[in-house]
């Protein structure tokens, strides 16, 4: 009899600042980073306490999902670029008897540059006799939109605050090749705004890679400057491209974008991340049950 299991997949983050060079080498496909890049990232991580909470928060999401599914469907967490690696997580599930693994990339919008790489890594790691099936994009899942809308309502947007929905940037070449990511991001933002009663808002991209090629915009910092020049003095950022706190949230928004707002004579805050939001975990449960036919 087939045994179902679940694998939650995320990007991964080093455990200490001393591991930054090794981590960046993995992220860069085996190409060692420059000393300047290592030092820049070390400074960024130091600014948020020395490490990212990504691994712990993803494990907390996994534990919350496990509690909803019960012991019959084991849940594991695997990272693409750091420990615990996706391959190790799959091996652990297989050792527990899993023959069918439902893998869920913890990124709401699909992109060939990110989500597909998680899927490929899981597929390559599957041992003989174990099938790994990826859940498709959940960018417009009603419970995902509800979960983000809950965070927006909790923030109590003020009439004079400009709401900006954000997601991770992509290289222009990827978008021009037909990647669906920008359209899915726009759909997520629209759905959350409708549920939260936000009539007017902007969308922007953040956390562009440190490469010379062009990345899609508008960049969050640039949009803040433009809106501030038009008289906006307060911003509320809603990062709907991410499902938990990590450096792209805690540094790129809370430190970098907030600094850009101050320099433009404005202030900036953001909504809380989903993390282990019960509504978000309920969505994950629904995805698993739909994929497996597993009943409570």
Image (cartoon, helix red, strand yellow):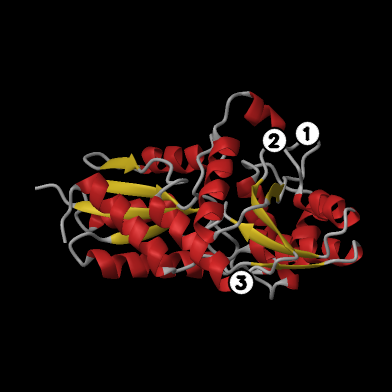
In the rendered image, which quarter is residue 225 located in? Answer: bottom right
Residue 171 is marked as: 2
Q: Are marks 2 and 1 in contact (CB under 8 Å)?
A: yes
C-alpha distance separating marks 2 and 3: 34 Å
- Identity of the residue drawn at 30% across and 58% down: 285
The numbered mark at residue 161 is none
Decide: few, some or many residues near mark 3? Use Cα within 10 Å; few <14, some 14-19, many ≥20: few
Could you say which is closer to the camera, residue 112 or residue 281? 281
Q: CA distance from mark 2 to mark 1?
A: 7 Å
Disc 3 designates what residue?
Answer: 156
Residue 26 visible in the current orientation? yes
Label 1, on which residue?
213
Choose between 8 and 154: the one closer to the eye.
154
Tell me which residue sits at (53%, 34%) in the image. 112
How many numbered circles are shown?
3
64 up-or-down from 135: above or below: below
Q: CA distance from mark 3 to mark 1?
A: 38 Å
Rendered-image quadrant of the C terminus: bottom left
Instruction: Point out residue 167 in the picture as x, y percentages from the top left corner.
Output: 63, 49
* Nearer-the-camera pick, 122 or 48: 48
Which type of secondary structure does the marked residue at label 2 adopt?
Answer: loop
Label 3: element kind = loop
Q: Are marks 3 and 1 in contact (CB under 8 Å)?
A: no
In contact (CB < 8 Å): disc 2 and disc 3? no
Q: Earlier in the sequence, mark 3 or mark 1?
A: 3
Label 1: element kind: loop
Find the residue positioned furthest to the top. Answer: 177
């Amino acid at each position: 009899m087939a045994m179902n299991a679940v694998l939650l997949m995320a990007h991964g983050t080093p455990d200490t600042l001393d591991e930054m060079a090794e981590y960046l080498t993995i992220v860069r496909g085996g190409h060692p980073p420059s000393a300047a890049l290592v030092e820049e990232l070390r400074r960024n991580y130091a600014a948020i306490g020395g490490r990212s909470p990504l691994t712990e928060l993803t494990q907390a999401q996994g534990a919350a999902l496990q509690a909803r599914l019960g012991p019959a469907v084991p849940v594991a967490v695997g990272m693409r670029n750091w420990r615990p690696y996706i391959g190790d997580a799959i091996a652990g599930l297989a050792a527990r008897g899993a023959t069918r693994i439902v893998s869920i990339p913890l990124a709401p919008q699909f992109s060939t540059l990110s989500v597909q790489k998680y899927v490929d890594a899981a597929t390559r790691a599957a041992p003989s006799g174990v099938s790994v099936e990826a859940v498709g994009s959940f960018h417009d899942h009603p419970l995902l939109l509800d979960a983000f809308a809950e965070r927006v309502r909790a923030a109590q947007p003020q009439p004079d605050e400009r709401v900006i929905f954000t997601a991770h940037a992509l290289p222009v070449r990827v978008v021009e090749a037909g990647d669906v990511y920008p359209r899915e991001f726009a759909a997520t933002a629209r759905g959350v705004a409708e549920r939260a009663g936000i009539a007017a808002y902007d969308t922007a991209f953040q956390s562009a890679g440190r490469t010379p090629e062009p990345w899609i915009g508008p960049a969050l910092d640039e949009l803040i400057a433009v809106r501030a020049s038009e008289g906006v003095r307060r911003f509320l950022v809603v990062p709907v491209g991410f499902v938990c706190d990590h450096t792209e949230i805690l540094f790129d928004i809370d430190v970098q974008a907030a600094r850009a707002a101050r320099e433009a004579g404005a202030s900036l805050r953001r909504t809380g991340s989903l993390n282990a939001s019960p509504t978000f975990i309920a969505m994950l449960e629904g995805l698993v049950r739909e994929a497996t036919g597993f009943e409570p």
